[in-house]
Amino acid sequence: MSYTALYRKFRPQEFEDVRGQEHIVTTLKNQIRAERVGHAYLFCGTRGTGKTTIANIIAKRTHRTLYKLNATTASLQDVKGIIGDVGTLLAPGGVLLYLDEIQYFNKKQQQSLLEFMENGSITLIASTTENPYFYVYAALLSRSTVFEFKPVTAADVRPAVERALALVQAESPLPLDWEEGVPDYIAHACGGDVRKAMNAVELLYEAAPAEEGRLRLTGSDAE
């Protein structure tokens, strides 16, 4: 089992399954229910707090085709290529563009996004791990609804860890169990990063020695 596969299988598919961002989820659910989804959102916060997950759910709930770009490698030509799909069979319900790490677009590139935001060609969700008020062009910022993703608490991470453990348990070719304190330790040690917690679960599983045809995940191994 690969880490990517585990995280993708674990990724919440509905708002109700997202942990730790209730202040964002409630607002977005109300907007979608009222069919008042905006043309631009800016998600800011540390890694592993649910930014990509919520973008996926918005696209699903609003029946938009989701495109993902990372500003570290993408260009405006990539954005224009996506705009070309608006109104075609590739995007019959419209386009939602998720632009990760927008701080890597320079001012001119960010300015160019305004054209697409203004004419409603796309719903833009930009994300950043930096302070958007320092790294995002003011005109773009003023046209976006800014959501701050908070670090997920250990109490909210624990159910996610338990779900991940249950997943590897179900797919393990050998019987698998774990000591009682393992989920709590991982939940507290991951620092509010759910993706990091999934990585820890998989590493712990893959490193577990087989004893008498069984696998057991221990607290000392987790440490």
Image (cartoon, rainbow, N blue to C red):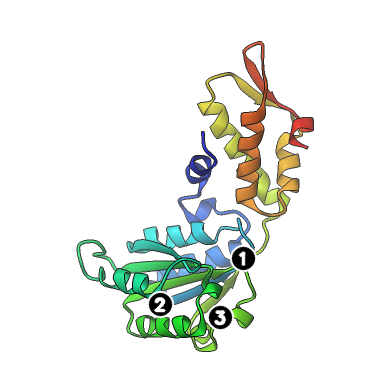
Instruction: Identify whether 194 is placed above or below 105.
Output: above
Q: Identify the residue at horizontal 57%, vertical 28% (top origin).
A: 169
Q: Identify the residue at horizontal 64%, vertical 75% (top origin).
A: 131
Task: Residue at the far left: name it.
Answer: 89
In the image, residue 70 lies at what x, y percent?
47, 65
Q: Identify the residue at horizontal 62%, vertical 66% (top origin).
A: 45
Evaluate whether residue 63 shows in this view.
Answer: yes
**Dot 3: element:** loop
Task: Residue at the far bottom: name it.
Answer: 139
Disc 2 target residue = 39
| Label number found at residue 136 | 3
Decide if residue 173 is on the left or right side of residue 133.
left
Examine the image and state in which quarter residue 150 appears: bottom right
Q: Amino acid at mark 1?
A: Phe
Q: Identify the residue at horizontal 53%, vertical 44% (top origin).
A: 7
- Comparing labels 1 and 3, the label whose residue is closer to the camera: 3
Examine the image and state in which quarter residue 47 appears: bottom right
Q: Amino acid at mark 2?
A: His
Q: Amino acid at mark 3?
A: Val
Instruction: Identify whether 156 is placed above or below 98.
Output: above
In the image, residue 90 lies at what x, y percent?
24, 61
In the image, residue 87 lies at what x, y percent?
22, 70
Decide if residue 145 is on the left or right side of residue 118.
right
Instruction: Identify whether 200 is placed above or below 119.
Output: above
Disc 1 target residue = 149
